[in-house]
Image: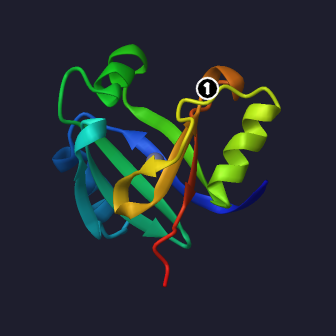
Amino acid sequence: MKLSHIEHIGIAVNDLNEAIPYYENILGLKCYSVEEVKDQKVKTAFFKIGQTKLELLESTSPEGPIAKFIEKRGQGIHHIAFAVDGIENALSEAKEKGVSLIDQKPRKGAEGLDIAFLHPKSTFGVLTEFCEDNNKS
Ligand code: ZN
C-alpha cells in the first residue's frame, strides 16, 4: 500500500467550545471548519498545520463512540489518519495480512473524504484510519 502523509490526528474532547480557544489562542492555529458527522455522533473542528490537520472530536450523544472512548480513557489522542492512494486496495491488503478491519469498505467521513478504520487490537493499540480524497477534480 502507499501512504503519503499523516492526513490528520483525531483528538477526543469533552467540549469543542472549551478546546478550540486553546488551539487558537495559545498554539495560534485557526479553526477553519466545524462540521457534524451524524452517523458517527460527533461534531468535529479542524485545524491545519503544514499538510496535516488536527481533528477535534466532541460526542453529540452519550452513546457515541467518542463518548465511550472518553469514558474509558479520558480526553486525548483518539486516532491517527494516514492519507493513502487507493483506499480499497489498502484495506484489502491489510485484511490479507491479518489485520482486523472496523470498516470493510470505505465510507464518507468529515470533509467528504473516503475513510475506513483498522481495529486497534491489530495495530498495537492505535486506532488507525485510512483516508483518501476522491473529490479532487
Ligand atoms: Zn479521523
Residue 86 in view (yes/no): yes
Does 123 sit left or right of 62 as displayed?
right
Q: Position of residue 13 (x, y in %)?
A: 31, 37
Instruction: Give the residue at x 70% y 29%.
Output: 123
- Quick one: which residue is furthest to the top in this view? 72
Residue 31's place in the image compared with 62, above or below, is below
Instruction: Give the residue at x 60% y 27%.
Output: 119
Residue 27 in view (yes/no): no
Q: Nearer the viewer, residue 126 or 108?
A: 108
Mark 1, ligand 1, within 8 Å: the answer is: no
Instruction: Give the residue at x 29% y 56%.
Output: 45
Residue 66's place in the image compared with 18, above or below, is above
Q: Position of residue 72 (x, y in %)?
A: 40, 14
Residue 21 in which image quadrant: bottom left
The residue that disc 1 covers is 120
Instruction: Give the residue at x 56% y 71%.
Output: 51
Disc 1 marks a residue whose amino acid type is Pro
